[in-house]
Image (cartoon, rainbow, N blue to C red):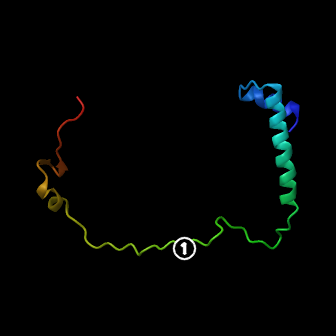
Amino acid sequence: MDKDTLRRLEMLNQLSLTEAQKEDVIAFFEKRDSELSVLEAIDTENTERMVHVMPIMTVVREDVVKKQFAREELQKGAPDTDEGYWCVPRVVE
């Protein structure tokens, strides 16, 4: 990162950095870039892409319908119903 890029980022993000802070930010990105070049030098040609380091197994059970309920059966315990709908007290006036 150079001073011009940092100045544009300051304007875009509405920041006001001191000169010492600007130097710290530039030094941070220079160090990051040098560390990144070390990583880019590693040969990963025969390395398989992965999301997790360890394999993750998801155990999923078979989705089987056991019992379907009729609306009338479910509404037997309801305090009040009207044409197949539950009636509840009004909450919002």
Location of residue 41 with respect to 79 vertically, above or below: below
Name the quarter where the N terminus is drawn.
Answer: top right
| Residue 51 location (% of width, % of height) | 65, 64
Q: Quadrant of the C terminus?
A: top left
Q: Please state which of residues 83 and 87 is positioned toward the viewer in this rendering.
A: 87
Nearer-the-camera pick, 52 or 28: 28
State left or right for residue 74 relative to residue 31.
left
Q: Is residue 40 left or right of residue 69?
A: right
Examine the rendered structure and indicate whether residue 82 appears above or below residue 15.
below
Which SS class for mark 1?
A: loop
Query: Residue at coordinates 19% horizontally, 49% vertically from top-left?
Result: 85
> Residue 7 location, x and y as percent?
82, 28
Snapshot quadrant of residue 47? bottom right
Q: In which quarter of the image is residue 19?
A: top right
Give the quarter of the image for residue 8. top right
Is 11 on the left or on the right of 77, as rendered? right
14 w.r.t. 49: above or below: above
Of the residues shown, which amino acid type is indicated by label 1? Met
Q: Which of 42 and 84 is in front in this view?
A: 42
For the point 74% across and 71% down, the residue is 48
Kindly identify which residue carries mark 1. 57
Question: Could you say where residue 80 lies in the image, as x and y percent from the top left?
Answer: 11, 47
* Rendered location of residue 16, percent (x, y): 75, 24
